[in-house]
Image: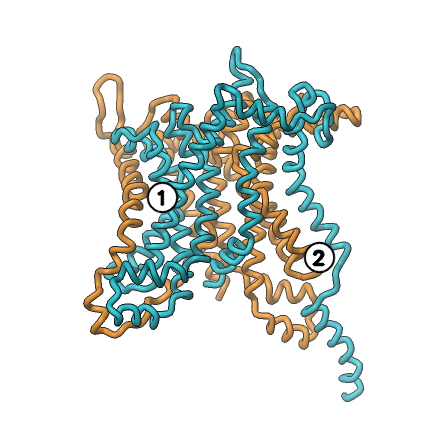
Chain colours: A cyan, B orange
């Protein structure tokens, strides 16, 4: 008995160490590296090919640089093409993100705060409604939304893209969980005792406490709006209101229309310029989206 | 982006003294009201409107008339609709397990602490999520190209003749690859986030019981993240049935392989925006919405039942 325990002890200790402070594994690292390469290779391809002239695109190897380093030239051409329409699309995208994602975040913060900190009639109903809505395929709503908006005269205006972007059920849910955990009830009571109105309490006391959750929701609604394709596709006819996604697709489709000029180098460079702001935002704000997702999964 | 919304019990409102609560009974609506108002406009009204549209028919002669469920029976006998539904179902049973499997393996690998540079892995694998579907599809579309894509390069370099990824037989698999690329990192992060909150004491207890690493994964880690697995599965199902962006954008590169009824969603889109058949289009959209909800609900029931 004692001997067997003695023999087992070192093995147990080793196992304990391997689970709590495991040794690094070259094999596992190498295997995971395959997925890493898969994830990054297309982005590398995009960067390399944004440095090529249209001629080089066709006759140089895809994953290495061509004869000329034409990145700056491509960027200039992208920005100048068709009287600088790319800049216009960029500005539109920023407008949709600021109004759409900003508005969605604001509504989600207000709503999540209410659901977490007030007991009001119909509160359970709001919860059921929003959870139910997550399961409704967004595209099932597209056609009727388009028809409704066209009767209201909103199609082909920025409103048609901004208004549907204002609702983020996931954002509301995240803010709800976050508000419930980060705002102590006593603090609100104290503010009310001091005679602060509900809105003053919200803006001066609650909002600063909600900041980390707010940044997370803002980041995810920004991605959703920046990358949106289907909604603007059905709502907008006029290329002057296009966001970047729609504009890039129009440039690409131009090559296959009769008499259209092939501008693949501009499509590729434009794509690179489109993704850079979001990649930068994700890298700079890592702390927020990583903690935000953890938060979402805490509640089982 | 709608993710990880579990269906938990809502966090309770703080227990306030009765006396004060009564005075503020309706105050909560001031805060949640704006959300609900916009929600009604962009969610509830369109749903009601499409149900309304689906029971009418508009004709050149005779105008709009009530036809009951005629549009529905037409859809159920429509070969194009069934083709599309079959295609996205095939996509669902092949692509989703592959994507979630890879995501789970990577999440477990990063969580195991056995990798060099694990935070780099985490961020880099997640990056494609920030790339718009349009850019992802254009990039892969160019790489698939037999003219100046990587496929052409490989053919030239090795003197081989790879099959065209954009041919009718392969285009669905090529789309599957694009979708996998876009969302593997996102799902990985959901699984990883769930793994991080597993209490460390469980691992220590398992080590004392002499459990090996595989045993810990199957007996502790996987059951602990079942909720995240079910949620990721449900959102992948919704995504598969809604498949639209990738095939539409690839259409200009592969016009022969991708028809206007390639997926049910693409079919509904073509019906209304090229065919002006709004009533029938709304019907197809409603049927797809119902199919999605039934499948998602079934998966959720099964996932939750096993949890006990």
Element on which disc 2 rests: loop
The dot on residue B275 is: none
Q: Chain of mark 1?
A: A
Question: In the image, is A3 to the left or to the right of B217?
Answer: right
Can you say which quadrant of the picture contains the N terminus of chain A? Answer: bottom right
Residue sitting at x 53%, y 40%: A277
User: Residue at image x 35%, y 67%?
Assistant: B12
Badge count: 2
* Residue B40 locus on image (x, y percent): 28, 45
Percent across and percent down for residue B277 are: 33, 25
Task: Say which chain tag 2 marks.
Answer: B
Q: Which residue is mark 2?
A: B115
**Figure check: B272 above or below A204:** above
In this view of the protein, which residue sits in the foreground, A171 or B183? A171
Along the horizontal axis of the image, is B90 left or right of A187?
A: right
Residue holding disc 1:
A166
Look at discs 1 and 2 and give the one toward the viewer: 1
Residue B30 left/right relative to B114? left
The image quadrant that residue A115 belongs to is bottom left
When the figure is inspected, residue A222 is found, relative to residue A254, above or below; the finding is below
Of residues B180 and B182, the one nearer the viewer is: B182
Q: Which residue is nearer to you in this view: A163 or A10?
A: A163
- Whether discs 1 and 2 lie on one chain: the answer is no
Secondary structure of the residue carrying tag 1 is: loop
Q: Residue at 61% across / 66% down in the picture? A: B219
């Amino acid at each position: 008995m004692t001997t067997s325990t003695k023999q087992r002890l070192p093995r147990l200790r080793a196992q304990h160490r391997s689970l709590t402070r495991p040794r690094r594994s070259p094999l596992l690292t190498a295997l995971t590296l395959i997925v890493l390469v898969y994830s990054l290779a297309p982005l590398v391809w995009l960067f390399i090919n944004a440095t090529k002239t249209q001629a080089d695109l066709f006759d140089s190897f895809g994953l290495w640089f061509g004869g000329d380093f034409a990145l700056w030239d491509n960027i200039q051409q992208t920005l100048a093409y068709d009287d600088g329409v790319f800049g216009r699309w960029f500005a539109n995208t920023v407008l949709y993100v600021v109004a759409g994602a900003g508005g969605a975040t604001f509504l989600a913060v207000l709503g999540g705060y209410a659901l977490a900190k007030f007991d009001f009639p119909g509160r359970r109903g709001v919860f059921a409604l929003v959870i139910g809505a997550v399961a409704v395929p967004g595209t099932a709503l597209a056609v009727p939304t388009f028809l409704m908006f066209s009767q209201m005269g909103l199609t082909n205006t920025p409103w048609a893209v901004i208004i549907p972007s204002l609702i983020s059920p996931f954002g509301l849910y995240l803010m709800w969980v976050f508000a419930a955990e980060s705002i102590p009830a006593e603090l609100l009571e104290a503010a009310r005792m001091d005679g602060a109105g509900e809105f003053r309490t919200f803006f001066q006391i609650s909002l600063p406490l909600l900041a980390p959750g707010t940044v997370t929701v803002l980041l995810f609604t920004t991605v959703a709006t920046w990358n949106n394709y289907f909604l603007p596709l059905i709502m907008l006819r006029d290329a002057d209101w296009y966001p970047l996604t729609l504009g890039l697709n129009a440039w690409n489709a131009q090559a296959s229309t009769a008499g259209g000029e092939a501008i693949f180098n501009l499509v590729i460079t434009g794509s690179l310029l489109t993704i850079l702001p979001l990649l930068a935002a994700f890298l700079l704000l890592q702390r927020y989206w990583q903690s935000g997702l953890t938060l979402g999964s805490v509640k089982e | 982006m709608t993710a990880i919304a579990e269906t938990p019990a809502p966090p309770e409102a703080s227990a306030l003294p009765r006396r004060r609560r009564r005075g503020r009974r309706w105050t909560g609506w001031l805060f949640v009201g704006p959300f609900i108002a916009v929600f009604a406009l962009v969610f509830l009204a369109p749903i009601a409107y499409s149900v309304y549209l689906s029971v009418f028919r508009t004709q050149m002669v005779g105008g709009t008339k009530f036809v009951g469920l005629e549009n529905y029976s037409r859809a159920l006998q429509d070969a194009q609709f069934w083709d599309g539904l079959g295609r996205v179902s095939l996509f669902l049973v092949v692509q989703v397990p592959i994507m979630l499997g890879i995501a789970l393996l990577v999440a477990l690998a990063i969580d195991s602490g056995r990798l060099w540079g694990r935070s780099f892995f985490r961020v880099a694998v997640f990056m494609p999520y920030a790339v718009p579907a349009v850019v992802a599809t254009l990039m892969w579309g160019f790489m698939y190209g037999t003219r100046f894509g990587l496929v052409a390069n490989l053919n030239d370099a090795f003197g081989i003749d790879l099959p065209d990824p954009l041919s009718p037989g392969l285009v669905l698999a090529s789309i599957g690859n694009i979708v996998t690329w876009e969302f593997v990192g996102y799902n990985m992060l959901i699984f990883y986030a769930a793994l991080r909150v597993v209490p460390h004491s469980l691992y220590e207890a398992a080590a004392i019981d002499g459990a090996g690493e595989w045993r810990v994964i199957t007996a502790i880690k996987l059951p602990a993240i079942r909720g995240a697995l079910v949620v990721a599965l449900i959102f992948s199902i919704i995504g598969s049935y809604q498949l639209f962006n990738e095939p539409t954008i690839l259409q200009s590169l592969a016009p022969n392989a991708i028809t206007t009824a390639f997926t049910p969603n693409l079919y509904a889109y073509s019906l209304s925006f090229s065919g002006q058949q709004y009533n029938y289009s709304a019907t197809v959209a409603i049927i797809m919405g119902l199919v999605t909800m039934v499948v998602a609900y079934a998966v959720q029931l099964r996932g939750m039942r096993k949890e006990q």
